Image (cartoon, grey):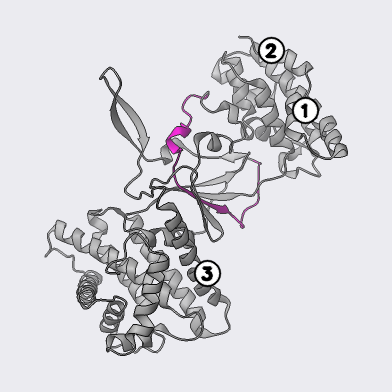
Amino acid sequence: MQNNVGTAAQAGSCGLVLGLAGGEGALFSYRMEDTSPLRQAVLAWLEQARDLPSIPQAITDVALSTQPEFDAVINAVAGAAPKSEHRDLYGKAEDDWAPRWSTLLSGSGLGDATRLVAQGATVPVEEVADSFVAFCTAPAPAVEDWLLLTGDLPEGARIPLGRYTLQTFTADELRQMGPMPALYGLQPGGLDLRLLAGAPFVHAPDPDRASDRSGAPWFDFTGPRPEARHWRALLPLILWSPELLHVDAVFDVERGREFGLHPNHVPTTLQIYEDHDGRQEEVEVRETGTFHVTQAQLPRLQAFCSAVTAKIDAVMDGATSSRRLPRRRALRLERAARHLLQAHQRTHSDYGVWEQEADELHLDYVITLEALMASPDDKHEGVSERIRSRAAALFLTPSLRQQVETIVQEAYSARSKYVHGDVLKDQEESEKLAALRDLRLIVRQVVLRWLVLTPCDTEDLAPLLDAAAAGTGRERAIDEPLRAFFRATPPQDRLGL
């Protein structure tokens, strides 16, 4: 194998020059002088890797760290990335601070590159060297939470969701997230990023975590499931469409350092295609579900998400209010959203729910309704009747209001039987699933309409709904605001509007 590593080492840091061109002269010179020895040390290390044994057991990261030539890499890292500026690269060794070999080999991907060279693979060593220099010397990136969602969005989609962003990426853009982009596709068993091209990700910085390259495991003890923790990003999306949207996986990402996507976390299926000769071929593809957004729908989705996010933010601002009602309203919205999202996550398809969980979903939906429809002034008696009439008052036609009352009444009946120890055996499975689907669609609409109508000051929505249910003040308090919202920022389903 001809890697021409020696020639590349003599060439110095030409790849780095292109990356830094256009900066201030003094800073440019300093960085050139500071990183060139590191780049040359990495290229020299990769050159000698051709002489290493190709047996996997002999070239583990632990074994590589004991190679005498690796000392030159460690010394070059210490010169280019001093501890005072890159504390997370260093660890204590014999009462002295030194760059950690585990970070330099495993965290950066240099160990993988070394093994590939030793095993005879063609490795773009100059790109590897540039990536390693950037890994060691670049400022620490923010730690981000990335949620992989089901669904299919147009290429280049990018929609703000408060502090979150809903975005799709090309395979090459995802490749650039890792510490060694040049190695993608060379390592056996690695994730095929083409599976994720166009996949919708919701991502945001994680303010509770700082970058750490020590290699120590980090455990998430925050408690709630991901759909509950990130409800403020997910709620606008499930209110947009009646099609189911799920969180498939959550990843910690540090751009340029760590992109920990694992192939087992990406739901896939096999599709059969015919080639030009008529021969059938099985191809692994990502499962996208039924949540689809076309290019033509993208502006509508963005406008809807912006409007709903603003309403969520306005309600949640009440969490720090000195007034009791805004604080309780914020808590109730969060509770409702968490239970609605939990029910969505456990609903695999319109008519697909685990039999053991079907009855429990009624609890989530009823809690969602009660969290939003209840009033601080309500008495304990007659709760279900008030919730039923207020939920129905959110809909504009008499036929829909009657339908909503019936569905909510049946949900309360199912909930009551279940919590008192009875399992709903009196329904066929298909009827139970159909009823759950109808309930899900109604509860989604109740949440959306509550967000549209609820005041953000100290006024309570419940009296307005009670008056509308009694036939007074309906047009001005309920109908006009709902029609105005649905005209300006319509979701995919408007249910009678």
Q: Main secondary structure of the magenta part?
A: loop
Which is more N-terminal, label 3 or label 2? 2
Q: Secondary structure at mark 2?
A: loop
Residue named by callout 1: 38
Which is more N-terminal, label 3 or label 1? 1
Residue named by callout 3: 313
Please report the residue visible at 37 percent of the width from the left and 79 percent of the height from the top: 480
Which is more N-terminal, label 1 or label 2? 2
Let me know if residue 374 appears in the view.
no
As drawn, 410 above or below 477: above
Q: Amino acid at mark 3?
A: Asp
Are the residues at dot 2 and dot 1 in contact (C-beta closer than 8 Å)?
A: no
Residue 391 position by quadrant? bottom left
The image's mark for residue 12 is none
Please report the residue visible at 34 percent of the width from the left and 28 percent of the height from the top: 283
Q: Position of residue 172 (x, y in %)?
A: 54, 33
Quadrant of the image containing the C terminus: bottom left
Quadrant of the image containing the N terminus: top right
The foreground one among 497 and 365 is 497
Residue named by callout 2: 4
**Mark toward the viewer: 2 or 3:** 3
Q: Amino acid at mark 1?
A: Leu
As drawn, 417 above or below 473: above
Separation of residues labelled 1 and 3 (CA atoms): 48 Å
